[in-house]
Image: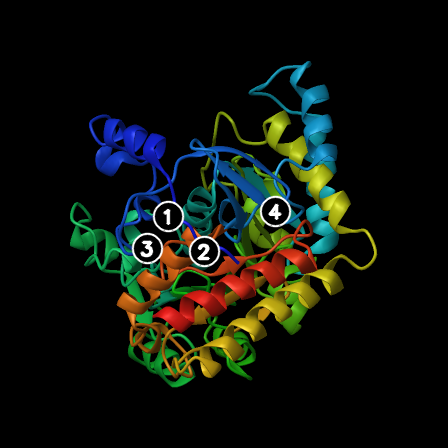
């Protein structure tokens, strides 16, 4: 493989202008490449497993717009369905029959969901589900896990993952102590810490919310028995168990992590894939709990663009595509080939590394590991990851610009794409 210096003149010009117009030059912090150095590339177009930047460079993409592009970018069937939907209008602000179709698909697929409410982002879904937890139980406190990210709402910006971890930020300025005083935290995969919090706060905890497979502190799967233990603890203490499946939903299995691991939470948040690349979120769960949501019940939550026809259309077509035979077997095959290959190359080139995959979600840490939680993840060699990221970018491979973000494959990735990626990784790791 021939390595050339990446020419990004137009990207640099556009980003320089952007920094005068938007904070940090971006609309979401991780995009700024702060943790990996250099300047971000500016996208021109995407299709299948590939990205093209404004300078004409092509990359194999393992970010997939942070998860939604599970069928590949700009899938022709999704695009065709959207063209037809566009002719009828972009937003109704009123009931739409497409909401029923996608709702039925979600309810049929996700074990915990008996009723669902559509919103416009994963953050919005998590905000609403927290309010619902409190309304249903009559309790204010909630347990979250260090490094898990549930959006940027005030009550969740305590030891959060994603961009907060990437940028090494403390709990965010502007968040009053009163907003987070009811948010309790524990290390991921630590049942004893959760037991202690319940013991210290009897009859005060509304529930436990977590990413069942962490993707916002890097890829961290649950230890054997962890999810099962949380299910027992919440039931024993009259609290709710909430799976934030914004990342894992319809990705690690059609029914999400709860199908994969056989653990049914009380409530679930979704996003990303169910919008097929358009802004969307959802929360759902047991009928008795969801019946508290307005207008059926007293807990208020609303949204002008919620359930809009374009997001519903893209979500419906995406879920239809995912139901084709062999979908998740293929995702597991190519992603395991990538994850195992990266670890083997790291060992052969003398680098401490750990990682793995579940279906189309993967991760690589530059630490000997194992990584069970965010504290373990922080032991990674961030400087080495930064150099690795840049080297891969120069060889036409686009990885998440943070050690603390999971990677994603798609049905559009081919064996040849994985082979090219591993060849690039071998070159880069040999040079680190």
In the rendered view, would you say 197 is above or below 271?
below
What is the quadrant of residue 116 in the picture? top right
Name the residue carrying label 1.
5
Q: Nearer the viewer, mark 2 or mark 4?
A: 4
As rendered, which of 18 and 205 lies closer to the eye?
18
First-in-chain label (4 vs 3) = 4
Q: Which mark is residue 156?
A: 3
Name the residue carrying label 2.
133
- Element class at badge 3: helix
Name the residue carrying label 4.
49
What is the quadrant of residue 329 in the picture? bottom right
As rendered, which of 426 and 297 lies closer to the eye?
426
Whole-angstrom CA distance, mark 4 to mark 3, is 33 Å
First-in-chain label (1 vs 4) = 1
Quadrant where the C terminus is found in the figure: bottom left
- Mark 3 surroundings: few (<14), some (14-19) or many (≥20) residues within 10 A: many
- Mark 2 surroundings: few (<14), some (14-19) or many (≥20) residues within 10 A: many
In the rendered view, would you say 73 is above or below 242?
above
Whole-angstrom CA distance, mark 1 to mark 4, is 22 Å
Number of callouts: 4
Which of the colour schemes (rainbow, by chain, secondary structure, one colour) is used?
rainbow
Whole-angstrom CA distance, mark 3 to mark 2, is 14 Å
- Element class at badge 2: helix
- Element class at badge 1: loop
């Amino acid at each position: 493989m021939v390595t050339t210096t990446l020419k990004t003149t137009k990207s640099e010009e556009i980003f320089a202008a952007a920094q005068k117009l938007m904070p940090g030059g971006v609309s979401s912090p991780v995009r700024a490449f702060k943790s990996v150095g250099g300047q971000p590339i500016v996208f021109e177009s995407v299709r299948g497993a590939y990205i093209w930047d404004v300078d004409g460079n092509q990359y194999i993409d393992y970010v997939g717009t942070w998860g939604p592009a599970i069928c590949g970018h700009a899938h022709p069937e999704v695009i065709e369905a959207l063209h037809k939907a566009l002719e009828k209008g972009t937003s109704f602000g009123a009931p739409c029959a497409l909401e029923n179709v996608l709702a039925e698909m979600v309810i049929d697929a996700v074990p915990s969901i008996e009723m669902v409410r559509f919103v416009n982002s994963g953050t919005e879904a998590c905000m609403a589900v927290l309010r619902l937890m409190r309304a249903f139980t009559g309790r204010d406190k909630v347990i979250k896990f260090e490094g898990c990210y549930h959006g940027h709402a005030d009550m969740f910006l305590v030891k959060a993952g994603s961009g907060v971890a990437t940028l090494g930020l403390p709990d965010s300025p502007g968040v009053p102590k009163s907003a987070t005083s009811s948010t309790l935290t524990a290390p991921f995969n630590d049942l004893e810490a959760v037991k202690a919090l319940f013991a210290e706060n009897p009859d005060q905890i509304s529930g436990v919310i977590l990413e069942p497979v962490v993707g916002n502190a890097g890829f961290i799967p649950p230890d054997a028995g962890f999810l099962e233990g949380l299910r027992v603890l919440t039931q024993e203490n009259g609290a709710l168990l909430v799976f934030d499946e914004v990342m894992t939903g319809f990705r690690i299995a059609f029914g999400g992590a709860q199908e994969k691991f056989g653990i049914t939470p009380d409530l679930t948040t979704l996003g990303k894939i169910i919008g097929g690349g358009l802004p969307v979120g959802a929360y759902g769960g047991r009928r008795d709990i969801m019946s508290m949501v307005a207008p059926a019940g007293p807990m208020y939550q609303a949204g002008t663009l919620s359930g809009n026809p374009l997001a519903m259309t893209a979500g419906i077509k995406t879920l239809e595509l995912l139901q084709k035979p062999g979908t998740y077997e293929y995702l597991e095959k190519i992603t395991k080939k990538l994850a195992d290959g990266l670890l083997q190359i790291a060992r052969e080139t003398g680098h401490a590394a750990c990682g793995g995959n579940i279906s189309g979600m993967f991760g690589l840490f530059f630490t000997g590991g194992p990584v069970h939680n965010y504290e373990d993840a922080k032991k990674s060699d961030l400087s080495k990851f930064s150099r690795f990221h840049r080297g891969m970018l120069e060889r036409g491979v686009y990885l998440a610009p943070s050690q603390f973000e999971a990677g994603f494959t798609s049905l559009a990735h081919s064996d040849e794409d994985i082979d090219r990626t591993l060849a690039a990784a071998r070159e880069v790791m040999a040079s680190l």
